[in-house]
Image (cartoon, helix red, strand yellow):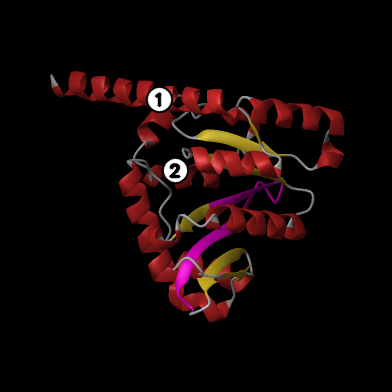
Amino acid sequence: MDNITFKITTATEAHLEYASIITDEMEQSAKARGTGIAKRSPEYIQTKMKEGKAVIALTSDGVWAGFCYIEAWGHGKFVANSGLIVSPPFRKYGLARLIKKEIFKLSREKFPESKIFGLTTGAAVMKINSELGYIPVSYADLTDDEQFWKGCQSCVNFEILQSKNRQNCLCTAMLYVPKPQQPVQEDVALRDDFKKNIKLFERWTRLKKYVMLNLKKTKDKTFNLF
């Protein structure tokens, strides 16, 4: 398997058969990490494929290897690259980075003036995002589209998000702003500063996760006493 090659392309109707495999793996991966994601149905994934708003990775033998899709919020002012998933047998080939680069490129082509954001608990995804020009931001910098936040209701950590008045949670918010919308020097400075301190940021993220989960456990235990 060391000589394996991947074909990463914009998903189309020709890839509809992979939808169920993709959603099943999304759910299993979230359970394995002990974190939550907004659940998507195979039909929803198929819609993204039909719209040309997704990227899929296949092996040369046609085996599904990875996937990611685009969602637009706030009348197209914000775009999210969601549902990044790599099939377990192919997770040591740098495929997630390749898929992220392709979905980012597709997002810029379809929504050139939109801000691109993401919520993630994964250090690997944060690293990839930083390479693409994202910087960590507060939740207040993200879309206020209610439909986006409703998608968090199926996450196992939704209670934490609610308790923080939708201003914080286990996920780290990251944002890419098209350069014409801000001074180039400022963008470069922020991005470079984040890259230099990414190890420290990762430790802080793990600490945040530990604190929030323990606060939730304490709250649940207290509630169960009554």
User: How much space separates mark 2 and mark 1, taking CA atoms?
Assistant: 13 Å
Amino acid on which the number 1 mark rests in the picture: Ser
Element under disc 2: helix
Circle 2 crowding by C-alpha within 10 Å: few under 14, some 14–19, many from 20: some
Relative to residue 133, is residue 201 drawn left or right?
A: left
Question: Residue 8: x percent and y percent?
Answer: 60, 68
Which of the marked residues, 2 or 1, is nearer the chain's N terminus? 2
Label drawn at residue 152: 2
Residue located at (40% from left, 56% from top): 26
Q: Is residue 43 left or right of residue 225?
A: right
Residue 173 in which image quadrant? top right
Amino acid type assigned to the residue bearing label 2 in the image = Cys
Helix or strand or loop: what does disc 1 sit on?
helix
Does the image show residue 18? yes
Q: Nearer the viewer, residue 45 or 195?
A: 195
Residue 70 is covered by the magenta coloring: yes
The dominant secondary structure in magenta is strand
Quarter placement of the C terminus: top left
Image position, residue 111 (x, y; %):
74, 55
Residue 146 shows in the view: no
Image point 78% across, 27% down: which residue? Answer: 189
- As drawn, which residue projects farthest toward the left? 225
Question: Compared with residue 11, is residue 125 higher up or lower down, i.e. above or below?
Answer: above
> What is the span of residues highlighted in magenta in the rendered image?
62-82
The residue drawn where x is 36% and y is 32% is 159
User: Is 197 on the left-hand or right-hand side of 4?
Assistant: right
75 vs 197, nearest the viewer? 197
Q: Which residue is mark 1?
A: 163
Q: Nearer the viewer, residue 145 or 79?
A: 79
